[in-house]
């Protein structure tokens, strides 16, 4: 630990020199070699020996990460490094590659300015590579490329030099195509990957050597020399001449921006306050003398210190005793300390200036995505996760005495991982946890049992469906039980382009006023509707088209709450709704507030909404996953049979040499047990990956069956109500 404290002390001194700071993330598809690469960079700081680098996987310090051999959460480390006589500080975040933990990547991208994309040269650009690169580009995070495991091309695929170079070119072109498609307009060209620029390296993280165009000139080595050394298995010689750590550091320092450069173009994207204000200028200029403004990107739980907020300081200087305002809590708290993470260990330091990734200790009730500042300020833009939780488990404490402990533990885990959703059903007493997939829920269960000490019993996984409408309803009238309040309502589907804009984060539901109106019109919502939006809730719209209705303003909050409740529990199966447009066309409201309380207004709004949805072709939507299976071509028939047997739609089949790649879209509900089945069908020789592919209409033949199953599970009458039931 003493060694780590010395390195942390050196890092804290280097934090003052903003010119020589690099805040970077390592992103890739699962098993492409991110953590192995991180080891070689960590070894440069002297935290581990060069011999152990690549095997120790020092940033996978979580017990489950070590057991499963995958990264589960983002890990931070600050590495001091001297390059050409100048001291630099590399604040590094190693991120997970598995699709179930993609939320950690999204949050890490808010804290960094540059990223290393790691690609396995045999597998090429995989679905998750594309996803993480899109997330980075959306946050204006500049990429460089490391093509890993090039020894596999020689030892496994037996490629010659020309074929290897063609493979590299294919990967580089693929990455450039993604940058052209998804990169910020002003950086589509400057951020292109090019061997001549020096922003791409080739190598093997496990064997700890790499080469770039610049390093070839510097070392005098040719591609032929490297190829021959690989054929001979002479990795030690290559480690001595072109060590991985120094080649990557050269690329990081020369091709990734420091905070002084990056914050000028990143702050306007992630913060929508007044850029001409003192705080705006302070953030653009990374001013350590300005007011402190910090973005929380992760919450770590410490058994001694409690909640530790990890994130990026964009402005000002923080030290123990600073009074900080928590934007989501509307209150001030005193900072108990600042620290840097050295992998598993958190080391306290005296103070931290703007432009660094740090940890804040002692802030209670702080959340991931929160803005922490010295004054009340415009918060940072909300972090938008690419995927949504699609698999749910019911969970209960084995011992009823542990019930309170279970609820606390679930809330704690949900704070650490915002992609996990916790729901406590007050009617049934059921506790539900929802995650990105089976593995995500397995990890949550493990943490509840082994880290939080709660003995639990869980149900088999349940798929999360949604409800939506695909037609228009007639105008319907809802009356309050006392018949004194009447509301006329129509239900329609939301335009698909608007739903897409909400899903990809173009439209932020928390925005208000003119800014929101313009975004909605641009996305395709008719102008008259966009100007009349009373509430946007989880992709559903409540639109006020009334003219001169008395007392409507007085009851606005109540009827919005009724609308939200209706959208959270749809009429078919009590699942969440999306893409529903509720238009209030007229209303008659009683003069006496005593006759228009929630007990009267909720039924008067909810019942016509439900009736309208049922008349507007209300349908269940099911979550789908994009599935990619790589396998020897002999097993193609078995793979397509297994995929189609699970209601999968084959979208593409590609063959390269002896390897075939099958791309399909498969319902999440059909994916349980797929791993064992595909292993059996390919004698364990297939590799498969999946990613979230959004919601689509459930097959009409299955609607009634699935709807009945969900209602039964939730303790509802098996037969869904009709529109008539809500209009009586």
Image (spheres, helix red, strand yellow):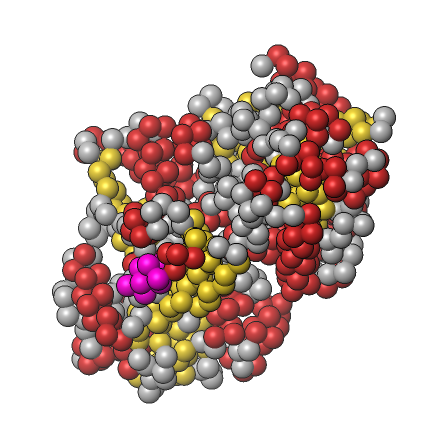
The one of 10 and 696 positioned closer to us in this rendering: 696
Q: Which residues are magenta?
A: 637-645
Seen in the picture, residue 84 relative to 371 is either above or below; the reply is above
x and y, in percent, of residue 702 in the image: 24, 70
Q: Is 715 placed left or right of 299 in the picture? A: left
Q: Quadrant of residue 597?
A: bottom left
The one of 316 and 409 positioned closer to us in this rendering: 409
x and y, in percent, of residue 664 in the image: 41, 63
> Residue furthest toward the top?
2
Residue drawn at x 47%, y 21% as measured from the top left: 304
Seen in the picture, residue 189 relative to 296 is either above or below; the reply is below
Residue drawn at x 37%, y 79% as measured from the top left: 470
The one of 687 and 494 positioned closer to us in this rendering: 687
x and y, in percent, of residue 47 in the image: 63, 20
Residue drawn at x 19%, y 68% as measured from the top left: 705
x and y, in percent, of residue 328 in the image: 52, 46
> Residue furthest toward the bottom?
474
Asked if the magenta segment contains residue 445, the reply would be no
Q: Is 47 placed left or right of 634 in the picture? A: right
Q: Is 298 placed left or right of 426 in the picture? A: right
The answer to whether residue 594 is visible is no
Residue drawn at x 58%, y 76% as measured from the top left: 521
Q: Quadrant of residue 441?
A: top left
For the N terminus, give its image quadrant. Answer: top right
């Amino acid at each position: 630990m003493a060694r780590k404290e010395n390195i942390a002390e050196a890092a804290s001194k280097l934090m003052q020199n903003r010119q020589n700071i690099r805040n970077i993330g390592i992103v890739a598809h699962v098993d492409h070699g991110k953590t192995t690469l991180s080891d070689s960079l960590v070894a440069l700081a002297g935290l581990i020996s060069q011999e152990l680098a690549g095997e120790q996987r020092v940033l996978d310090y979580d017990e489950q990460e070590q057991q499963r051999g995958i990264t589960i959460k983002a890990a931070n480390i600050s590495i001091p490094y001297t390059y050409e006589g100048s001291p630099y500080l590399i604040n590094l975040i190693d991120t997970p590659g598995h699709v179930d933990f993609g939320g950690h990547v999204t949050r890490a991208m808010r804290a960094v300015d540059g990223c290393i994309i790691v690609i396995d040269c045999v597998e090429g650009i995989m679905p998750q590579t594309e996803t993480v690169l899109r997330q980075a580009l959306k946050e204006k995070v500049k990429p460089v490329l490391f093509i890993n495991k090039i020894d596999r091309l020689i030892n496994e695929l037996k490629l010659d030099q020309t074929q290897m170079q063609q493979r590299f070119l294919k990967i580089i072109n693929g990455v450039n195509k993604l940058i052209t498609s998804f990169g910020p307009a002003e950086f589509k060209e400057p951020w292109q990957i090019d061997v001549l620029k020096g922003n791409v390296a080739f190598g093997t993280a496990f064997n700890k050597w790499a080469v770039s165009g610049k390093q070839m000139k510097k070392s005098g080595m040719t591609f032929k020399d490297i190829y021959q050394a690989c054929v001979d298995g002479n990795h030690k010689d290559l480690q001595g001449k072109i060590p991985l750590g120094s080649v990557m550091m050269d690329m990081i320092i020369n091709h990734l921006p420091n905070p002084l450069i990056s914050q000028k173009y990143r702050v306007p994207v992630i913060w929508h306050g007044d850029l001409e204000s003192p705080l705006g200028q302070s953030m653009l200029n990374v001013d350590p003398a300005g007011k402190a403004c910090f973005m929380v990107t992760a919450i770590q739980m410490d058994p001694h210190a409690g909640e530790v907020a990890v994130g990026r300081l964009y402005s000002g200087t923080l030290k123990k005793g600073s009074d900080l305002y928590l934007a989501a809590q509307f209150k001030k708290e005193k900072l108990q300390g600042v620290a840097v993470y050295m992998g598993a260990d958190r080391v306290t330091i005296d103070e931290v200036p703007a432009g660094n990734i740090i940890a804040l200790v002692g802030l209670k009730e702080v959340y991931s995505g929160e803005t922490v500042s010295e004054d009340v300020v415009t918060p940072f833009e909300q972090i938008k996760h690419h995927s949504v939780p699609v698999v749910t488990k019911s969970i209960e404490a084995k011992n009823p005495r542990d019930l309170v402990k279970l609820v606390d533990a679930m809330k704690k885990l949900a704070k650490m991982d915002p992609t996990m959703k916790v729901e406590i059903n007050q009617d049934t007493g059921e506790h539900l946890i929802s995650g990105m997939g089976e593995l995500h829920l397995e990890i949550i269960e493990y943490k509840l049992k082994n880290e939080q000490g709660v003995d639990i019993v869980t149900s088999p996984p349940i798929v999360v469906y949604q409800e939506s409408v695909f037609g228009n309803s007639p105008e319907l009238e809802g009356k309050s039980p006392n018949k004194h309040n009447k509301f006329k309502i129509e239900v329609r589907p939301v335009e698909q382009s608007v739903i897409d804009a909400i899903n990809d984060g173009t439209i932020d539901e928390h925005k208000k006023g003119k800014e929101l109106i313009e975004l909605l019109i641009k996305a395709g919502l008719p102008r008259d509707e966009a100007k009349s939006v009373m509430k946007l809730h989880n992709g559903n719209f409540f639109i006020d088209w009334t003219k001169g209705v008395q007392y409507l303003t007085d009851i606005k909050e109540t009827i919005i709450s009724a609308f939200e409740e209706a959208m959270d529990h749809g009429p078919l199966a009590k699942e969440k709704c999306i893409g529903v447009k509720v238009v209030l066309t007229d209303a008659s409201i009683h003069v006496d507030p005593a006759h228009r309380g929630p007990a009267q207004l909720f039924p008067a709004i909810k019942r016509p909404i439900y009736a309208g949805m049922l008349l507007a072709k209300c349908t269940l939507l099911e979550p789908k996953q994009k599935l990619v299976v790589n396998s020897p071509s002999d097993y193609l028939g078995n793979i397509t049979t297994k995929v189609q047997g699970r209601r999968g739609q084959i979208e593409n089949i590609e063959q390269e040499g002896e390897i075939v790649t099958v791309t399909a879209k498969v319902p999440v509900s059909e994916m349980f047990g797929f791993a064992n089945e595909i292993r059996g069908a390919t004698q364990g020789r297939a590799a498969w990956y999946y990613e979230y592919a959004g919601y689509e209409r459930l097959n009409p033949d299955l609607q009634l069956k699935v709807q009945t199953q969900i209602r039964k599970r939730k303790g509802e009458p098996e037969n869904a109500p009709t529109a008539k039931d809500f209009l009586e």
